[in-house]
Image: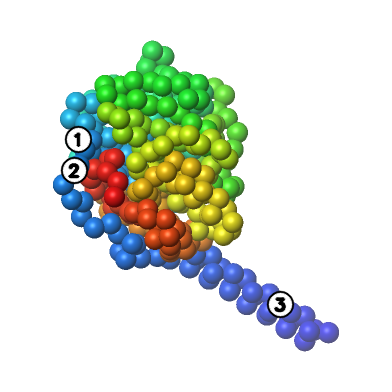
Amino acid sequence: MARWIVRALGLVVLALAAAGAWVYWGLTHHPDAASYATRAPGPARTNVRVTYLGVSTLLFDDGETQIMTDGFFSRPSPVELFAGKIAPNERVIEASLARAGVKKLAALIVCHSHYDHALDTAVVANHTGAVVVGSQSTANVARGGGVPEDRIRTPALGETLSFGKFRISLLASRHVPNGYPTGTIDAPLEPPARANAWKLGAAYAVLIEHDGRALLVNGSAGFEPGALDGHKVDTAYLGVGALGKTTDGYMSDYWRETATATGARRVVAIHWDNFARPLDQPLQPLPQLVDDFPRSMDFLRRRGRETGVRIELPQGWQTFDAFASP
């Protein structure tokens, strides 16, 4: 009997060690993005440039007006996330805005209110004078950081807001189904706070129009069935983080409800990078435990070949034509 117990305990120890090794590998292994990287951008065919700043942070600039989606730069480390409360890193934010060439933002449009989208909202808005556009949850993030009420907008779905020549509309979307905190932020959120205090709120796909051209920014790899029907765009910027951990059927539905529904001839993959890694370092894919980056990119490339849609994977700080399609 004692010998059986010793053997059983030994098997338990081995199983725990194997599980620990698997988790460690999954958290530390990052697939190589080099083979999927977009070639250097060619000459602009429109007068609107976009700079990719990691996750779903995109700076659009037509030479007269600048707008930005999300505006997340602090990128807390795993130690900061799990050890306690997080807060915007103002030094990192200011340095990132300066490097990106941000002068005065007309609008900061927040796709949803998780910390990797909304943590820096108030600091970015206060530093640039931007109007914050988003959900009631995003509005409470802005209020918690001291953004004046007259620079907070919570438009109805489909309502159009104008900033210079840019026309912005929020369309219904969802978060990729991966267990991140849902719910709403119902009172001003003052940092520091735990990461899960930044609840989802409403999730949006952002329609951006400019001089007869249109593009879509979908900040997470989620979708609201039928929400994009009838909205035609040249380029779709699609969040792909954790898409590789979903089913084949879900991936096909995501493509159909975003790229196919909008008639996009160009898809730019965003929200693919490890957002616990500082932005002044080269971007790397999310760890294997939370995403299967090669599976996502192989799927996109395959669908792109089948449908004649160009697939691009921008690198950090890369600037290119915002609207151009093949």
Q: Is residue 272 left or right of residue 157?
A: left
In contact (CB < 8 Å): disc 2 and disc 1: yes
Whether residue 61 is visible here, answered yes or no, is yes
Placement of 240 over or under 162, stated as above or below:
below
Q: Given the current orientation, which residue lies at the most extreme left position?
A: 43
Graded by Cα atoms within 10 Å as few (under 14), some (14 to 19) or many (20 or more), the crowding at tag 2 reads few
| Alpha-carbon span between mark 2 and mark 1 | 7 Å
Q: Which residue appears at 18% of the width and 50% of the height?
A: 42
- The x and y percentages for residue 91 are 27, 36
Q: Amino acid at mark 1?
A: Asn
Look at 42% across and 56% down and name the residue there: 307
Q: Which mark is residue 44?
A: 2
> Disc 3 designates what residue?
9
User: 310 or 217: which is nearer to us?
Assistant: 310
- Element carrying mark 1: loop
Q: How is the image coloured?
A: rainbow
User: Looking at the image, which is closer to me, 238 or 175?
Assistant: 238
Task: Tell me which label, 2 or 3, sits earlier in the chain.
Answer: 3
User: Which residue in the structure is indicated by mark 1?
Assistant: 47
Query: What is the x, y in percent for residue 197?
Result: 53, 35
Observer-side mark, 3 or 1, equals: 1
